[in-house]
């Protein structure tokens, strides 16, 4: 698959896109029928659905909401691609630490994986990851806090392909809880 080339790159990568929606599990602009039909795998090896906790609307500093799910696991546990899609960015930022942005095949969704200890092997932007492929390893980088190893996993609907790091958040919890 050819690599997606974007005209711009994030001015300030973040843990999740900015959104004006504060209490919805699926933001109003998102097509809920197509979102509910997404077939995802839990992106941390060995974690079962009953071990997940819905942290999407959890309060965070500055009056913001989490807009993601935290999946607790020991450092080094394999992080799996939740769905098929292209790896479009590997980066480090103060909030998310080591992060991966993955875009699904129809270029409408971003899967964001943060606080990684490391990336898998020679993973690089332009690689295509199939659902269940190991793409990284759980860690506590960024603002996770030393020893607070987990995967911060979020999903958003791309509202502008040139600004893929922004969009309307979707709660991953009901999609992974199946």
Image (tube, helix red, strand yellow):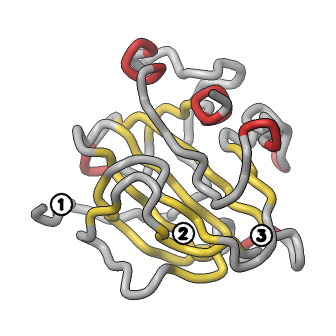
In this rendering, would 26 be left or right of 125? Answer: right
**SS state under label 1:** loop
Relative placement, left or right, of 111 versus 97 is left
Q: Where is residue 10 shown, x and y percent of the image?
A: 40, 63
Q: Where is residue 129 in the image (x, y as percent from the top left)?
A: 34, 62
Q: Which residue is drawn at 68% across and 67% down?
A: 95
Q: Nearer the viewer, mark 2 or mark 3?
A: 2
Q: Which residue is drawn at 41% across and 52% down?
A: 131
The number of discs equals: 3
Q: Nearer the viewer, residue 102 or 82?
A: 82
Which label's residue is closer to the chain start, 1 or 3?
A: 1
Above or below for 102 versus 89: above
Residue found at x 72% / y 75%: 139
**Image position of 111 with respect to 99: above or below:** above
C-alpha separation, residue under disc 1 versus residue under disc 3: 29 Å
Q: Residues within 10 Å of mark 1 (few under 14, many from 20)?
A: few
Residue situated furthest bottom in the rendering: 122
Say the numbered circle drawn on residue 99. Answer: 2
For marks 2 and 3, the one nearer the N-term is 2
- Separation of disc 2 and disc 1 at Cα? 18 Å
User: Residue 13: percent from the left, percent from the top?
Assistant: 51, 63
Task: Examine the image and state in which quarter residue 170 appears.
Answer: top right
Q: Do the residues labelled 1 and 3 touch (CB within 8 Å)?
A: no
In the picture shown, does residue 146 fall above or below 58? Answer: below
Q: Which of marks 1 and 3 is in front?
A: 1
Residue at position x 46%, y 56% in the image? 132
Q: Which mark is residue 103?
A: none
Q: In this figure, which residue is indicated by the disc labeled 3?
A: 143
Say which mark, if any, is on residue 4: 1
């Amino acid at each position: 698959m050819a690599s997606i080339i974007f005209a711009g790159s994030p001015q300030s990568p973040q843990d999740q896109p900015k959104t004006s929606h504060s209490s919805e599990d699926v933001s109003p602009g998102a097509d809920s029928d197509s979102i509910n039909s997404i077939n995802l795998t839990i992106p941390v090896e060995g974690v079962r659905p009953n071990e997940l906790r819905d942290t999407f609307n959890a309060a965070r500093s500055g009056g913001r909401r989490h807009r993601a799910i935290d999946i607790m696991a020991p450092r080094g546990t394999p992080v799996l691609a939740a769905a098929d899609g292209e790896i479009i960015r590997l980066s480090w930022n103060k909030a998310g630490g080591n992060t991966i942005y993955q875009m699904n095949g129809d270029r409408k969704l971003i899967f964001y994986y943060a606080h990684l200890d490391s990336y898998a092997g020679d993973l690089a932007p332009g690689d295509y990851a199939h659902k269940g492929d190991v793409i990284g390893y759980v860690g506590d980088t960024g603002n996770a806090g030393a020893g607070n190893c987990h995967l911060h996993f979020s999903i958003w609907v791309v509202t502008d392909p040139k600004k893929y790091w922004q969009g309307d958040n979707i709660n991953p919890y009901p999609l992974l809880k199946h």
